[in-house]
Image (tube, rainbow, N blue to C red):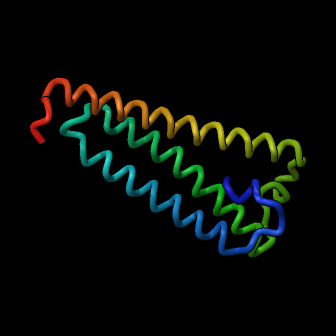
Amino acid sequence: MVSYWFPAPVAAWLPLTLTIGFGALAVIAVVMTLARQQEERDAGLIATFYGIGLGLAAVSELLMYFDVVYGWSFAVAFAMSASFVTFIAVAAVVIAFGALCIAAAMQIQEEGAYHSTHGLVH
């Protein structure tokens, strides 16, 4: 997702690093959000949005890694046009960014509600 916007050629380490980074962030965000289910009633939904946003970013970077290292392209395998691939890339960015924004907004709202009802006891 991120490395798609870099000018070609892209070094193999960049999409691999981004894949590992986005994957690790997805796991951390989901686990830490689910750990707060006692305090946040919507923790499962928030974790789902974090997983979708960061997971989509990780999968797209993995596909870019396969393209750079092995020459295997999802677009070529399914005979997609360049304009359709660009559309899919933009749609993936919008979905991932939207899911992350929704998750962050929901978490901020839940945090505010928790603090308004419980004060700052912790």
Q: Position of residue 116 (x, y in %)?
A: 19, 24
Snapshot quadrant of residue 62: bottom right
Q: Position of residue 43 (x, y in %)?
A: 31, 38
- Residue name at image x 46 percent, y 47 percent: 51
Q: Residue furthest left?
A: 121
Q: Residue furthest front?
A: 120
Q: Is residue 54 left or right of residue 46?
A: right
The number of discs equals: 0
Snapshot quadrant of residue 108: top left
- Residue name at image x 65 percent, y 60 percent: 61
- Residue name at image x 38 percent, y 56 percent: 28
Snapshot quadrant of residue 13: bottom right
Q: Is residue 36 left or right of residue 93?
A: left
Q: Position of residue 83 (x, y in %)?
A: 88, 43
User: Vertical placement of 4 versus 88: above or below?
Assistant: below
Q: Nearer the viewer, residue 80 or 41?
A: 41
Q: Is residue 35 left or right of residue 23?
A: left
- Residue name at image x 69 percent, y 61 percent: 63
User: Vertical placement of 46 versus 80: above or below?
Assistant: above
